[in-house]
Image (spheres, helix red, strand yellow):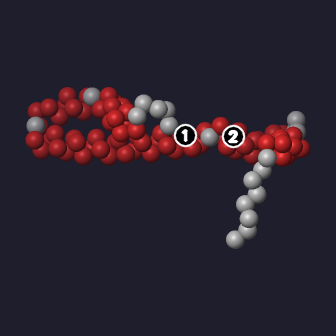
Amino acid sequence: MPAVHNYTVEEVRTLFTETVVDTFAGSPEGQAQLNRIAKSITNESLIKRVKSQRETHAEIAFNARLADVVAKTPDSVAQFVAGKANWIARHIAAKYGDSEA
């Protein structure tokens, strides 16, 4: 297994200034690469994935709870479904905390 090279801050700055020049985004490929660099630096993609994953899990939990409501108290289904957004938000906050990601 090859050794992992841990870059220093100075090496990354040098690499960045030598690679990303003013004309870097002059082509669609360059722009796409610049977008990937920015997302990597800001963790934008990771944050979106975590948020989406949490929403998916909350949706699954909501559907399971909805099945219980339908089976046990069918008269309250409309009210339960009307509060779906709040239920999902509370579920995410309870399960993962109030942090953004």
User: What residue is disc 2 on?
Assistant: 41
Of helix, strand and loop, which one carries label 2? helix
Task: Return the x and y of residue 53 as percentages of the image width and height.
Answer: 45, 45
Q: Residue furthest bottom?
A: 1
For the residue pair 76 and 51, the one nearer the viewer reads as: 51
Residue 57 coordinates in the image, percent (x, y): 37, 45
In which quadrant of the rendered view does residue 54 lie?
top left
Q: Secondary structure at mark 1?
A: helix
Of 48 and 15, nearer the camera is 15
Q: Is residue 44 left or right of residue 8?
A: left
* Quadrant in the rendering for residue 26: top right
Q: Residue at x 79, y 42 (%)?
A: 9
Q: Position of residue 77 (x, y in %)?
A: 17, 34
How many residues crowd mark 2 within 10 Å: few (<14), some (14–19), many (20+)? few
The amino acid at mark 2 is Ile
Q: Residue at x 37, y 33 (%)?
A: 93
Label 1 close to label 2 by CB (< 8 Å): no
Residue that appears at 28% across and 41% down: 62
Q: Assess disc 1: are there few (<14), some (14-19) or many (≥20) residues with their C-alpha within 10 Å of its C-alpha.
A: some
Q: Quadrant of the N terminus?
A: bottom right
Q: Which residue is mark 1?
A: 47
Q: Residue at x 11, y 37 (%)?
A: 74
Is residue 91 at all visible to an observer of this figure?
A: yes
- Residue 20 position in % (x across, y down): 84, 41
The answer to whether 27 appears left or right of 49 in the picture is right
Alpha carbon separation for disc pair 1 and 2: 12 Å
Residue 98 vertical position relative to residue 2 in the rendered view, above or below? above
Q: Is residue 74 left or right of residue 35?
A: left
Report the number of discs. 2
Q: Which comes sooner in the sequence, label 1 or label 2?
A: 2
